[in-house]
Amino acid sequence: MMRFHSTRGARGASLRAALTSGLASDGGLYVPSRIPRACDAWRECNHFAGLGLTILRPYLEKEVPEDQIVSIVREALDFPVPLVRLEGWDDTYVMELFHGPTLSFKDFGARTMARLMSFFTAGAPVTVLVATSGDTGSAVADGFAGCAGLRVALLFPEGQVSSMQAQQLTLQRPGVRAYAVQGTFDDCQAMVKEALASPQGLRLSVANSINVGRLLPQMLYYFWAVIQGGFEEVVFCVPCGNLGNLTGGVLATQAGLPVKAFLAAHNANRAFPQYLQTGTFTSGLSVQTLSNAMDVGSPSNFDRLQHLCPDMRAKVTGYSISDEETLRSIRCVHEETGYIADPHTAVALEAARRHRKATGTGLPHVVLATAHPAKFPETVCRALGQGLAIPPGLQGLASRPKRVEPLAATKAALMEALRIWR
Ligand SMILES: *Cc1c(COP(=O)(O)O)cnc(C)c1O
């Protein structure tokens, strides 16, 4: 049976415990006790959900019956994951991870975790708390909506998310309540932490980005890119914030995927690139940028990455790209290849371009595209001087029913709201 150890030493948690508690009791992050080799069976997979079963089964079997594993993975991973070749850029590809319901790569983790949590908590209803500053909240809300035995309370800072994000967050969904907190994102996080620390008889859990249930499915698309491209060896370029996406890639290599190097593409929040360069990790306050889902001063997966891959400075090259360079990247990529990238993907495309130029390597580069450009219309328009077609997933968003409740930024207000929720 697969066990999960804490990065701080606690050992032997089950998947159920690791998933439902989120953080280990000693405050560390859960990592798998061993990483099963994927052998070569994965090379034969020609369907994404089939690949998901092959890679994820060893982590789930013994705790989840086979028929449940099949339905969880099939339902969670039921959207396309295309690898697009950039015409005009040498052997550079974009792996589009934004074709799930909320148009960001967080759908992979959120949809899988929701179904696993629903399975593990069956019969005893649980309220899942999420503090969000944007993309995570809508992916989690969408992933959990209608899952039996689960309800989701989304906490976001009133007036501090983009208009598109606010519309996505406050969509009326079964079992989901959105609370506009009169405070900052940090207040939202503090309220969640305090509620978990003393739940006053409520069954509470949390769906933040460090949950292993979100991490494990983030291995899959690295395998998928290599299968789709038929690559022998490859460089992956990852738009990074909390480093969860990159951690998924590192797990994939340890399961046997042949990866030559990873590029960690950051915006002006450069704690990790600085660590890779100097060997000293200094976290700071987050800086606001155009790629706001990557505005992280202190990446929450850093300890986990270091635990899994102590020699990561040899495997990962860091880049920090400014807002001005991000806008220029959107424009140049569009001019040179016709491709329209969102600001997060544009950061990674610029890192890939620099890496190729600096190393002269002829290896294929795969850039992970983490959000649909139409989620960031203001920035993309500013870069290109032209509007964007709205994809079906965002059409009609403005006219769909919304529900949002104001909430004071205190734990007491949150507990009261949860208590009167009927
Ligand atoms: C969350 C997010 C990222 C950063 O991913 P991490 O796993 O936190 O490093 C990048 N791009 C987009 C669009 C995101 O939503």
Image (tube, rainbow, N blue to C red):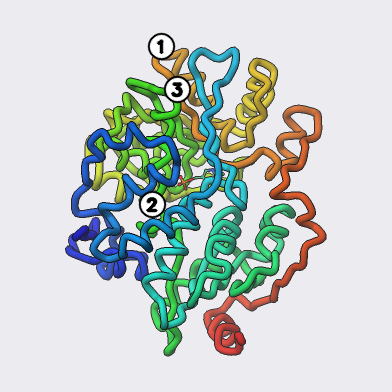
Secondary element at tag 1: loop
Secondary element at tag 3: strand
Q: Pick the quarter of the image with the C terminus.
A: bottom right
Residue 362's label in the rendered image is 1
Q: Is 178 displayed left or right of 81 in the figure? A: right
Identify the amino acid type marked 3: His
- Tell me how far mark 3 sits from mark 1, CA to CA: 9 Å
Identify the amino acid type marked 2: Leu
Location of residue 15 with respect to 201 vertically, above or below: above
Residue shown at the point (56%, 80%) measured from the top left? 414
Residue under numbered circle 2: 215
Does the closest atom of ligand 1 sit within 8 Å of the Cβ of label 1? no
Residue 133 is situated, as x and y percent measured from the top left of the image, at 59, 57
- Tell me how far mark 2 sits from mark 3, CA to CA: 23 Å
- Sooner in the amino-acid sequence: mark 2 or mark 3: 2
Q: Nearer the viewer, residue 163 or 254?
A: 254
Q: Quadrant of residue 82?
A: top right
Residue shown at the point (48%, 23%) measured from the top left? 352
Residue shown at the point (80%, 34%) measured from the top left? 387
Residue shown at the point (44%, 28%) measured from the top left? 228
Residue under numbered circle 3: 365
Residue 301 is situated, as x and y percent measured from the top left of the image, at 37, 50
Q: Pick the quarter of the image with the N terminus.
A: bottom left
- Tell me how far mark 1 sits from mark 2, CA to CA: 30 Å
Residue 265 is situated, as x and y percent measured from the top left of the image, at 47, 33
Identify the amino acid type marked 1: Gly
Secondary element at tag 2: helix
Few, some or many residues within 10 Å of mark 3 (<14, 14–19, 20+) = many
